Amino acid sequence: MFTRYTRHRLTEEAIKAKAHLILGVYSKLGACCLVPGERDMALGTDVLKQVARDEHITLLAANIVTIDGGKPAFKASLLKKVGSTNIGIIGIVGKKAGYDSEMLSKAGLKITDPSQAAKREAAVLKSKGAKLILAISHLGFGEEDMVLKSAPDITFLLGSHQGRRLTRKIERPGAGPAWVADAGVRGQYMGRIDLYPAANGEPFKHLEDGGVEGRLKKEIARQEKTLEREKARLNSQGDVKKSMEQEKRRRTARIESLERRISSLEKELPGLKKDRTKSALFARKSTYLKRYKEQIQSLKKAPFPTEEETKKRIEIRRNSIKQSIDRMTKRLNEKKKELNKLKPNDPNKAHFISKAIPLDSSVKQDQKIASKIKAFKASGIQEKAISTKPVLQRKQPLIKPVMPLHIPLEPKHPLPLIKR
């Protein structure tokens, strides 16, 4: 969002405009709340809060408090009603998630223990009638497990900061399992969780992961394709003469590639040498030129392997590929056994299915997003204020991953937790 690292490129007003754009897209997507990350408070909490209010986004952080008095800087949690079900949402940040302690201190803020804050807010939400509690988080390595084991009332932790794409189960003896769900980075995927309440009794008691079967089948299919490629690679190893010819072609192609680079650098360097402002670039590219020439000399001097040496190399490669195939086959058989042991989902028991939906990160996707945010320009947002390049030329999409939660009233008709 708005970060101190952009100050040398953008004015304060441009950073605010960028923040309005990103939070506005979140709002259009239907997000109700988010946790401020380590870069989001670079212009201060007051600016962040104002932008969030303007875009109708609730900021949650149960453990960012004032140094004097320990008052919460943001709302700690919220309770949403979906159909007849109350869902509690807690915001948690981590001490290992890259937050600038000096910047926070100047703002009169500090981060307290995330585990204690999560446990406290979960108890508050449960007392208000929450049937399911989840945390949206910005935590560092190891902090997710610590929070979920300390707060047994939290069932889901929707993660960020670590850039993974996964659904991970955490066993908690005596408290029931919990799950960490993360949808990756840079808008490449949108995470989604579909919840299916139990038909009788407590709607989310004894919750089970109903998406294990689908993920196992995908993993098995992926491993089978990889195994077939390795087998084809093994079969291609054996023809000595063909292998010797391939080595000659590879070396010739490498020399030609290096010669093209040398030719390009020799044309570019005289111009760089005349420009004193580019002395560092001239020195670096001169080093590249020297290195490329040395590589060409080395390749030309090196003798081609003999037939006997080629046979030995082929045998070493074949043994390596065979070992790889054995390991893959073992893992594949383990996955198949795991799949066979799975029981079908019981409709009378609560279960969920998590998905990571791929998003098109091409220029076309940027054009679609850009067309949807024309309304923001009426508020004074200009493309030049957002980036040095036009929005439509960006390689990455303008949206970040989100993890919307859906609770179906009936198995075939999911009801969105966040109304769009």
Image (cartoon, rainbow, N blue to C red):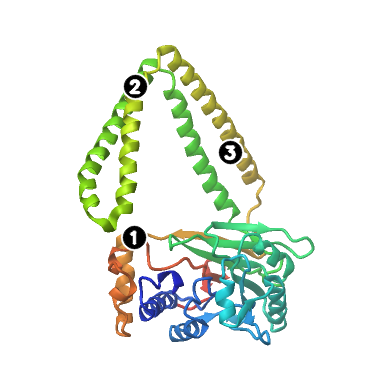
Q: Mark 3 points at which residue?
A: 332
Left or right for 202, reference 18:
right
Specify which label sits upstream in the sequence, 1 or 3.
3
Residue drawn at point x = 28 percent, y = 55 percent: 278
Percent from the top left, x then y, of residue 46? 50, 86
Percent from the top left, x then y, of residue 345? 63, 57
Percent from the top left, x then y, of residue 343? 66, 51
Q: Mark 2 Cα within 10 Å, few/some/many (few <14, many 20+)?
A: few
Residue drawn at point x = 26 percent, y = 56 percent: 276
SS type, badge 1: loop
Residue type marked 1? Lys
Mark 3 or mark 2, which is nearer to you? 2
SS type, badge 2: helix
Specify which label sits upstream in the sequence, 2 or 1.
2
Specify which label sits upstream in the sequence, 3 or 2.
2
Q: Is residue 83 something that shows in the picture? A: no
- Is the Cβ of the residue at disc 2 closer than 8 Å to that at disc 1? no
